[in-house]
Image (tube, helix red, strand yellow):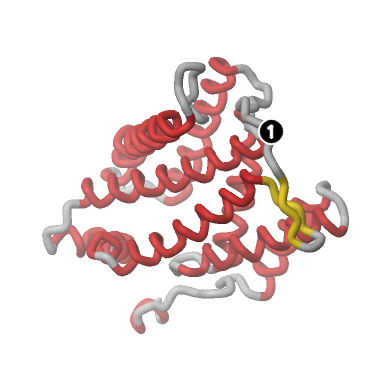
Amino acid sequence: MLVRAPHFSLIPAVALTLVVAIIVGCSIDWLAYSPLYRKRASTSIYLLNSFGLYTALINLVALVYRSEVRILPTTPQSTLFFGPVLLTENQLIQITISIILLPMMFALRKSICGRLIRAVRDDAALAETTGVNLFIVRSLVFATGSAFAAVAAILAVLDVGADPQAGLPVLLTAAVAVIVGGIGSFGGPILGSVFIGALQSLAVWVLSPRWAQTITFSVLILFMIFRPIGILNATKRLEEAFD
């Protein structure tokens, strides 16, 4: 949630929100996920632990801020027309920041940090034997992911507001986008997100907002049946293909 008190202007509030998000994300890894990693827990344990953490944090936020939509006070916004499309200032800011962040994500992939992250993802034990500090790499991943998630949350709050339960539909849609795009590939989730987002917007425009989730999960079912690897599947080593 955007940290904004009456005496805070928008820019300091955004900066403080990013810092808090990074601290919370890294703390979750240190306190909840790292112990499971050291115990070699299964994927299902990670999943259950994630849902437990999500439920606890959501209820904590609801207890403090109450379960109601929070709208930040803003000045009246002008609207721009692009043919039949109407965009507000906040929506233009969302598009601009997305265009700026996308090249940063690809630059991160090509950087030394990105290569270390992919090495740990592929084989953490082997990476550790070569001198890679898993604690630092994991903290970097959670800090970067939390920062990107905080940016998306700030833009959403400025546009339509938020309530403590607003994260679950986004989480489920993001999971569908990752599966549709291709688990394990870098560009897959990005392509899947664009595809699912365009599909939901088209459903809202042509049909009704109530159809957005129905169409989203119908697409998921079709992909699970006909192309479970997603649009872009990660390239595997030859020996992995025969496991």
Residue 235 visible? The answer is: yes
* Residue shown at the point (87%, 56%) measured from the top left: 207
**Which residue reaches farthest right?**
207
What is the three-letter code of the residue carrying label 1? Answer: Pro
Is residue 115 left or right of 231 when viewed as pictured? left
Looking at the picture, tell me which residue is in the foreground, 107 or 131: 107
Looking at the picture, tell me which residue is in the foreground, 236 or 6: 6
* Residue shown at the point (57%, 50%) measured from the top left: 94
Q: Position of residue 83 (x, y in %)?
A: 79, 63
Residue 32 visible? The answer is: no
Q: Position of residue 172 (x, y in %)?
A: 62, 48
Look at the picture and state if 158 lies above or below 105. Answer: above
Look at the picture and state if 13 lies above or below 122. Answer: above
In what element is the residue under mark 1? loop
Q: Which residue is disc 1 drawn over?
A: 76
- The tally of labels here is 1
Is residue 183 left or right of 79 when viewed as pictured? left
